[in-house]
Image: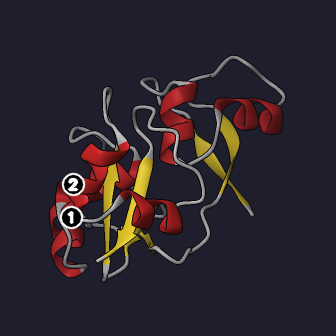
Amino acid sequence: MYKVYQVSSRDTWEDIARKFHTSIETLQELNGMTMLIPGGMIVVPTVEESTFFTVYTVKKGDNLYDIARKWNTSVDVLLSANGLEKEDYLYPGQELLIPKEGYQMAITKEGDTLRSVATKLGTSGENLFQTNEKIYLLPDQLLVVKK
């Protein structure tokens, strides 16, 4: 499924790809363009619900703090799961990934090892491999484990 996204003056291909959990190449191919035009519209893939996440559609008046409280998670987890920064705005209709209860997640950083991520999540490397299809240990990879 796809939807239309309006490009802001601060957006980069990388920002949009991270926000919609896709690649720059996919976005450029979908839109037949390599240059972003602020105020212009592009097509982006929508996120479908998964085993680990629920998709929440932002409503007018929502903010990250209220959403985090409602879903029993933290603002930092919401930011990481959705490729957002604290200064980013939420807008009605935006879809956010909300970690389902019973799962923990970590976003990898430069220098992480399988052992360091497993330790941070309180699990084993074997459990990480069972839950995650591919583990690259490159910065910004989302890894999930069952609590």
Assign the C terminus to one quadrant of the image.
bottom left
Q: How many neighbours does mark 1 have within 10 angstroms: few (below 14), some (14-19), or many (20 or more)?
A: few
Q: Is residue 143 above or below residue 131?
A: above
Residue at numbered disc 1: 122
Quadrant housing residue 139: top left
Assign the N terminus to one quadrant of the image.
bottom right
Which numbered disc covers residue 119?
2
Q: Position of residue 13 (x, y in %)?
A: 58, 27
Q: Is residue 17 left or right of residue 24?
A: left
Secondary structure type for disc 2: helix
Q: Position of residue 48 (x, y in %)?
A: 62, 70
Which numbered disc covers residue 18?
none
Q: Is residue 16 above or below residue 103?
A: above
Q: Amino acid at mark 1?
A: Gly
Q: Which residue does the image show at 25% across and 79% down from the upper left?
A: 71
Q: Which residue does the image show at 53% across and 28% down from the upper left?
A: 14
Q: Nearer the viewer, residue 38 or 106?
A: 106
Q: How many neighbours does mark 2 have within 10 angstroms: few (below 14), some (14-19), or many (20 or more)?
A: few
Q: Position of residue 117 (x, y in %)?
A: 29, 49
Q: Which residue does the image show at 43% across and 62% down from the upper left?
A: 126
* Colouring scheme applied when the structure was drawn: secondary structure
Q: Is residue 23 left or right of residue 92?
A: right
Residues at marks 2 and 1 touching, judged by CB atoms closer than 8 Å: yes
Q: Is residue 41 left or right of residue 103?
A: right
Q: Amino acid at mark 2?
A: Thr
Q: Which residue does the image show at 48% across and 45% down from the upper left?
A: 19
Q: Position of residue 101 (x, y in %)?
A: 31, 82
User: Disc 2 versus disc 1: distance between alpha carbons?
Assistant: 5 Å
